Amino acid sequence: MTGAPPDPAPDTTPVIEFRGVGLTYPGPPPVPALRPSDLRIGRGEFVTVVGPSGSGKSTFLNIAGLLDAPTTGTYLLDGIPTRELSDKARTGLRGNRVGFVFQSFHLLPHRTALENVALAMVYTGVPPAERLARARTALERVGLAHRTASPPTRLSGGERQRVAIARAVAGGPSLLLCDEPTGNLDSENARKVMELLADLHREGLTVVVITHDRQVALRGGRTVTIRDGRLNETREDGPAYEAGAGDGVGAVTAAGAAALAAGGAV
Ligand SMILES: Nc1ncnc2c1ncn2[C@@H]1O[C@H](COP(=O)(O)OP(=O)(O)O)[C@@H](O)[C@H]1O
Ligand SMILES: [Mg+2]
């Protein structure tokens, strides 16, 4: 027996696996915000989620990110069943594996960009001594090395969202969840933010972006539509953006555009 051991099998465990996952807010009256749904999102995918206001997009994202627990079904994150987890285990799993980006940035106004990014690693198990170094690297990664000492109040909207993205990725998550990340940005800053998310995806991160902007939706390799709490695939046609196209949020392939138009999303 000579030679190298056989390659390990590639990890095909989905990052997100919903088996009949649903959430009904108790009310009264009860609100079926997410109807029981099946969904798999594999490692390294870039998925966009579209749907009208109130359709359940944030509910979906909050479940996927372990901010809310479903009221029915089984959710596996990185193959780990999440239902029976203690609060502490849930918080740990979320801290280590999930990065969040929100429409309104959710930055601490009186802390510097560097502190905002470093503080988010408190729950990730990154040793305190390493947090500042990693925060600095993450801010460099999003093009803000020169703004580390600025509080968010002195940054533009686009810069704030890039700080939030640095915060989301600094701990090395396996999943980046973005809830309307361009919703508060002008088109130029929206384009830059989507470019950055596409770059992170190319580097291997699994990215889910919720949007109600169809141009943003076209950036994903796959789009899931949600209406009245029902999840549906609308297209599955490989990356819809052209690598390195870099000429706008709408830098999409003809195939992607045609497929989305056919699917009638948003
Ligand atoms: N905490 C809550 N309690 C009760 N109903 C809620 C709560 N959060 C959201 N909802 C309802 O659930 C539905 C889906 O909301 P949401 O997921 O926020 O939609 P979207 O993000 O697509 O706008 C809406 O009808 C909304 O009013
Ligand atoms: Mg929402």
Image (cartoon, rainbow, N blue to C red):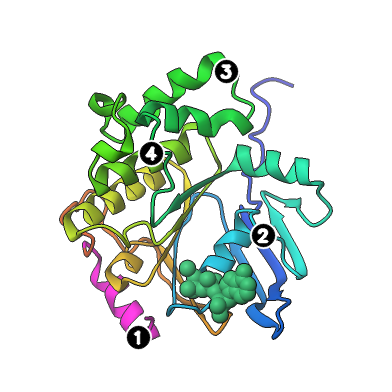
Report the amino acid beneath label 4. Answer: Pro
Residue, disc 4: 109
Q: Is residue 264 visible?
A: yes
Find the distance from the CA under tag 4 to the CA under tag 1: 43 Å
Report the side of 140 relative to 122 (left or right).
left
Residue, disc 3: 128
What secondary structure predominates along the stretch shown in magenta? helix
Q: Which residues are magenta?
A: 251-266
- Nearer the observer, disc 1 or disc 2? 2
Badge 2 crowding class, 10 Å Cα cut-off, few under 14, some 14 to 19, many 20 or more, is few
Which secondary structure lies at badge 3?
Answer: helix
Which secondary structure lies at badge 2?
Answer: loop
> Residue 228: where, in percent of width, then height?
55, 85
Q: Determine if the magenta segment contains residue 264.
A: yes
> Residue 11: where, in percent of width, then height?
63, 45
- Nearer the observer, disc 4 or disc 3? 4
Residue, disc 2: 68
Report the amino acid beneath label 3. Answer: Pro
**Numbered label attached to residue 117:** none
Report the amino acid beneath label 2. Answer: Asp
Q: Is residue 231 visible?
A: no
Badge 3 crowding class, 10 Å Cα cut-off, few under 14, some 14 to 19, many 20 or more, is few
Report the amino acid beneath label 1. Answer: Ala
Find the distance from the CA under tag 1 to the CA under tag 2: 33 Å
Q: Up-down: is 27 above or below 213?
A: below
Please name the residue shown 25% across and 66% down the image: 253
Task: Work out whether mark 4 precedes mark 3 in sequence or the reverse, and give the earlier one.
Answer: 4
Badge 4 crowding class, 10 Å Cα cut-off, few under 14, some 14 to 19, many 20 or more, is few
